[in-house]
Image (cartoon, rainbow, N blue to C red):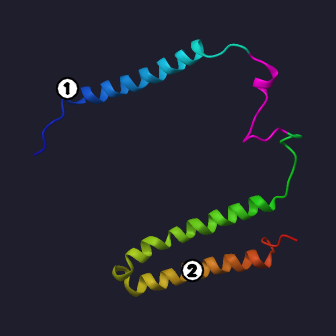
C-alpha cells in the first residue's frame, strides 16, 4: 500500500512556485522602473529583421502559399499516423496491413484530387 501524501510533502513545490512567480513580478517591475523613458519616433517604429518597413502589411498576396502550407501540414500529419502502425506491424497482423492499405489508398485519392484540381500548379 502506498504512503499517504501530507501537506508537508508539497512545501517544496509551493516554495518553487512562489519563487518563480516572485521572479516574474520583480523582473517586470524592475524593467518598468529602470528602463528608458524617452519615446522617440525612431523607437516607436517597427523594425523587423533589419529591414525597413515599406508599404502596408495588409496588402494581398497569392493564396497558393497558404494552400501549399495547409496541404503540407495535412499530408505530414497523416504520415505521422503511419509510425505507430510501423512500430506495431507484427502485432497487427493481416488486418493491420489491410487497414493501412485502405488508409494509404485514401491518401492517394486525396492527392490525386489535389492534382486534378491543379492546386499545386503555380502558373
SS label for mark 1: helix
Q: Which residue is mark 1?
A: 8
Residue stretch rendered in magenta on the structure:
39-53
Residue 35 versus residue 14: which sits nearer the camera?
Answer: 35
Q: Nearer the viewer, residue 15 or 6?
A: 15
In this rendering, is residue 23 above or below 100?
above
Residue drawn at x 81%, y 58% is 63
Mark 2: secondary structure: helix
- Report the residue that reaches farthest toward the front: 50
Q: Residue at x 39, y 80 (%)?
A: 89
Does 49 sit above or below residue 66?
above
Q: Relative to 70, is 119 on the left or the right?
A: right
Q: Residue 51 location in percent, x, y?
A: 79, 41
Q: Dot 1, how many residues are within 10 Å of its Cα: few (below 14), some (14-19), or many (20+)?
A: few
Q: Is residue 37 above or below residue 103?
A: above
Q: Residue at x 49, y 81 (%)?
A: 99
Q: Quadrant of residue 103?
A: bottom right
Magenta span contains residue 15: no
Residue 40 percent coordinates (x, y)? 78, 18
Q: Distance between the Cα atoms at labels 1 and 2?
A: 54 Å
Residue at image point 79% right, 28% down: 45
Residue 59's x, y, as percent?
87, 46
Location of residue 62 by image quarter: bottom right
**Callout 2: few (<14), some (14-19), or many (20+) C-alpha neighbours within 10 Å?**
some
Of the pair 57 and 94, the residue shown nearer to us: 57
Q: Magenta segment: does it hold 43?
A: yes
Q: Mark number for residue 117? A: none
Task: Residue under label 2, please give it.
Answer: 104
Among the two numbered marks 1 and 2 on one chain, the one whose residue lies closer to the N terminus? 1
Amino acid at each position: 500500500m502506498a504512503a499517504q501524501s501530507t501537506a508537508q510533502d508539497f512545501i517544496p513545490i509551493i516554495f518553487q512556485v512562489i519563487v518563480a512567480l516572485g521572479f516574474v513580478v520583480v523582473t517586470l517591475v524592475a524593467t518598468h522602473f529602470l528602463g528608458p523613458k524617452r519615446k522617440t519616433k525612431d523607437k516607436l517604429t517597427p523594425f523587423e529583421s533589419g529591414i525597413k518597413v515599406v508599404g502596408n502589411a495588409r496588402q494581398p498576396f497569392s493564396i497558393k502559399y497558404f494552400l501549399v502550407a495547409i496541404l503540407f501540414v495535412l499530408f505530414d500529419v497523416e504520415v505521422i499516423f503511419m509510425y505507430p502502425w510501423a512500430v506495431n506491424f507484427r502485432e497487427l497482423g493481416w488486418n493491420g496491413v489491410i487497414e493501412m492499405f485502405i488508409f494509404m489508398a485514401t491518401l492517394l485519392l486525396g492527392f490525386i484530387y489535389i492534382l486534378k484540381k491543379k492546386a499545386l500548379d503555380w502558373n
